[in-house]
Image (tube, rainbow, N blue to C red):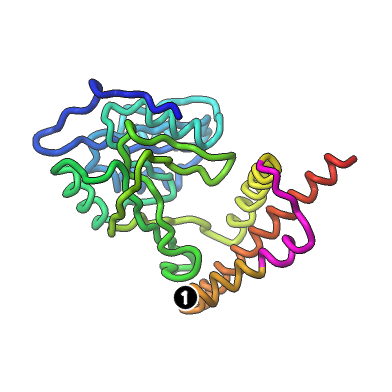
């Protein structure tokens, strides 16, 4: 793995605190970007990497930072690593445009960097707002995300979807939450499902996975049972039921599209 050393760049403290660079990647996020950046107003700098937005995303972004970079879309992993590389400081907090740093998390991070952190990265619980309520059960919670890390010890890795930060050592855990405002409607979910399931199917094929009748029937059912019953998604009412069904549907479409790819390869 190629971690580039930056011991001489951005390593100094500001006062008694280690400086933190916040990074985001965007594309047509005018509905989200303002609130996301506002939640990062405490960070020492904010880096935005935009892949050709044709709405007001970058104009809104400039109200919060002058470090906005425009570049062609090259995939989630590469875009996020590019954002990390533009940062002036080694401690990185990565946020998606539809996420917010809760006040409790902001306070926790600021307290953490007042001294040398014990770990080189930290997993943060993420809670999703869906159908006018916070979903705190099922597969959607606590949905830990490794978003705060020292870039000298970690980089973004992964396939076309489901990218994540890989650390050289084990991460710690924080208690403050990332607030996730995803899926404003079922139509928005279905639109994203179409895109993500296609990318996931390509990743599955590359990894040598095979779609079978057992996978098409069994994996979605197992996903639903796990989320709704074992992880008590039913405690979130009808939105919890919908989240469990949506999770199962996502699994079905990934394997259905993988089956399509297998048929094309067999022709």
**Residue under the image location 42 percent in, 56 percent down:** 180
**Residue under the image location 26 percent in, 33 percent down:** 45
- Is residue 133 rendered to the left or right of residue 74? left
Residue 235 visible (yes or no): yes
Residue 129 in picture, x, y percent from top left: 43, 63
Q: Residues within 10 Å of mark 1 (few under 14, many from 20)?
A: some
Query: Magenta segment range?
Result: 207-220
Residue 260 in picture, x, y percent from top left: 80, 48
**Residue under the image location 48 percent in, 76 percent down:** 232
Which residue bears the numbered disc 1? 236
- Is residue 17 rendered to the left or right of residue 43? left
Q: Quadrant of residue 59?
A: top left
Of residue 200 and residue 119, the one placed in the foreground of this image is 119
- In this rendering, the answer to whether 261 lies above or below 13 is below
Residue 64 visible (yes or no): no
Q: Name the outermost residue toward the left.
A: 15
- In this rendering, the answer to whether 117 lies above or below 255 is above
Residue 209 lies in the magenta-colored region: yes
């Amino acid at each position: 793995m190629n971690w580039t050393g930056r011991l001489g760049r951005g390593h100094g403290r500001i006062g008694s605190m280690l400086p933190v660079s916040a990074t985001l990647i965007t594309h047509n996020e005018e509905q989200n970007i303002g609130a996301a950046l506002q939640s990062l107003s405490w960070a020492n700098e904010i880096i935005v990497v935009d892949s050709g937005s044709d709405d007001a995303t970058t104009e809104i972004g400039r109200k919060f930072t002058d470090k906005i970079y425009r570049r062609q879309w090259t995939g989630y992993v590469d875009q996020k690593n590019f954002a990390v590389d533009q940062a002036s400081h080694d401690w990185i907090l990565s946020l998606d445009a539809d996420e917010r740093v809760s006040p409790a998390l902001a306070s926790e991070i600021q307290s953490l960097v007042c001294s040398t952190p014990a770990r080189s990265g930290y997993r943060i619980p993420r809670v999703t707002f869906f159908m006018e309520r916070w979903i705190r059960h099922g597969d959607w919670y606590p949905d830990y995300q490794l978003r705060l890390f020292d870039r000298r010890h970690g980089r973004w890795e992964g396939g076309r979807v489901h990218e994540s930060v890989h650390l050289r050592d084990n991460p710690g855990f924080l208690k403050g939450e990332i607030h996730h405002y995803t899926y404003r409607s079922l139509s928005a979910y279905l639109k994203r499902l179409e895109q993500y399931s296609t990318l996931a199917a390509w990743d599955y094929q590359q990894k040598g996975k095979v779609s079978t009748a057992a996978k098409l029937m069994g994996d979605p059912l197992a996903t639903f049972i796990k989320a709704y019953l074992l992880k008590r998604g039913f405690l979130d009412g009808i939105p919890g039921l919908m989240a469990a069904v949506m999770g199962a549907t996502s699994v079905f479409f990934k394997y259905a599209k993988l089956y399509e790819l297998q048929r094309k390869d067999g022709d």
